[in-house]
Amino acid sequence: MPGIDECLLEAMRLPGARGAALVDWTSGLALGSVGEFPGGDHEAAAAETAEVARLTAEQRAFTPDDGGEGADPPVEDLIISNRDSYHVLRFVPTSFDSSVFLHVWLARSDGNLALARIRLGEMAGRLVLG
């Protein structure tokens, strides 16, 4: 079971990966990061994506039809696209009260969204926090 650093290095092996981070969406802090990020500032990117993640995770409109009760976050992932890149945010379920997500920044020209979603889901399931 990989830790944070191993998980982020694995994320960087995705086609088109430009940067990866594990972010706590309640504090907006990056627990780990690798590669580059928009504006060159990992901490600013973590705070900004944490705000988007928090707003999404806390809205009832995005919960599953069954109410989303349980240990897993109600939202699995978010995809944000712009002219030249994709941002994929994958919420990480944990056995303790936690609110973290994996964030991968992909170049649009080389990135593969389907593969990124699958691999981030696998990584989130194997990630060991603590």
Image (cartoon, helix red, strand yellow):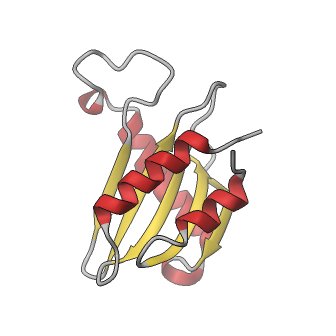
| Residue 93 screen position, x and y as percent | 53, 33
Tell me: 102 left or right of 129.
Answer: left
User: Residue placed farthest to the front in the image?
Assistant: 1
- Quarter-of-image position of residue 59: top left
User: Residue placed farthest to the right in the image?
Assistant: 130
| Residue 27 screen position, x and y as percent | 63, 46
The front one of 114 and 74 is: 114
Tell me: 57 left or right of 127.
Answer: left
| Residue 105 screen position, x and y as percent | 45, 70
| Residue 37 screen position, x and y as percent | 53, 76
Tell me: 47 left or right of 96.
Answer: left
Q: Is residue 74 above or below residue 33?
A: above
Residue 26 visible in rendering: no
Residue 48 visible in rendering: yes
- The residue lying at 24 percent from left, 30 percent from top is 61
Q: Quadrant of the C terminus?
A: top right
Tell me: 5 left or right of 48.
Answer: right
